[in-house]
Image (spheres, rainbow, N blue to C red):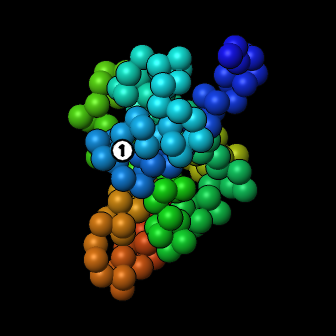
Amino acid sequence: MKVSREQMAENRSRILTEAARLFRDKGFEAVSVAEVMKAAGLTHGGFYGHFASKDDLIAQTVAHALTRQDVGGGAEAFLAAYLSPAHRDAPATGCPTAAFASDARRQTPEARAAMAAGTAAQIARLAAALESQGVGDARGAAIGCWSAAVGALILARAVGDEALSDEILDRTRGWIAASLKG
């Protein structure tokens, strides 16, 4: 049966969305193509109509997921929400940068390029928000804030001690707020 272009695009979007959720939650290596296709509600056989390989899926999923990070509401509000226990406790639907960062170095050049482009775009979005708030050296501040926030989220998710995890988030939020005030 022939599938329309619109249906192909919708299926591809579902695959990328489900792959992003599964990869965030379990990591790239722990997720199979069959698992992604099942989560998307599609058959395994349809995969190769959309992607050349699992590596291609990973690269395209990274690019897809990283385009969806928005700084709406201002930099401080974004960073406060980013460094919240609710965000920490939802890795499958949370920040793809924090979820993908440690695995990205072991991926294909295409996946790493998508990670670099997504990171650069997020820094640019954050810098624009900071610049609109009158922060001097907005790009430098954005790089520092983004790096601190992502690192703190990764650590907060990694430690098995909830009090320490909360402290990592709280202290990083405070440090970022103080650094933005100059």
| Residue 51 at x, y percent in the picture | 47, 20
| Residue 179 at x, y percent in the picture | 47, 62
The residue at the far bottom in this view is: 163
How many numbered tags mark residues here? 1
Q: Quadrant of the N terminus?
A: top right
Residue situated in front as seen by the camera: 145 or 67: 67
| Residue 146 at x, y percent in the picture | 46, 50
Residue situated in front as seen by the camera: 75 or 35: 35
Q: Is residue 63 visible?
A: yes
Q: Is residue 96 visible?
A: no
Please name the amino acid that badge 1 sits on: Val
The residue at the far front in this view is: 1
| Residue 7 at x, y percent in the picture | 72, 25
Residue 9, quarter of picture: top right
- The structure residue drawn at horizontal position 45% and vertical position 76%, both measured from the top left corner, is 170
Residue 148, quarter of picture: bottom left
Q: Name the residue under label 1.
A: 31
- The structure residue drawn at horizontal position 50% and vertical position 74%, both measured from the top left corner, is 85
Residue situated in front as seen by the camera: 63 or 21: 21
Q: Give the SS element for disc 1.
A: loop
- State left or right for residue 21 relative to residue 4: left
- State left or right for residue 23 relative to residue 29: right
- The structure residue drawn at horizontal position 47% and vertical position 19%, both measured from the top left corner, is 48
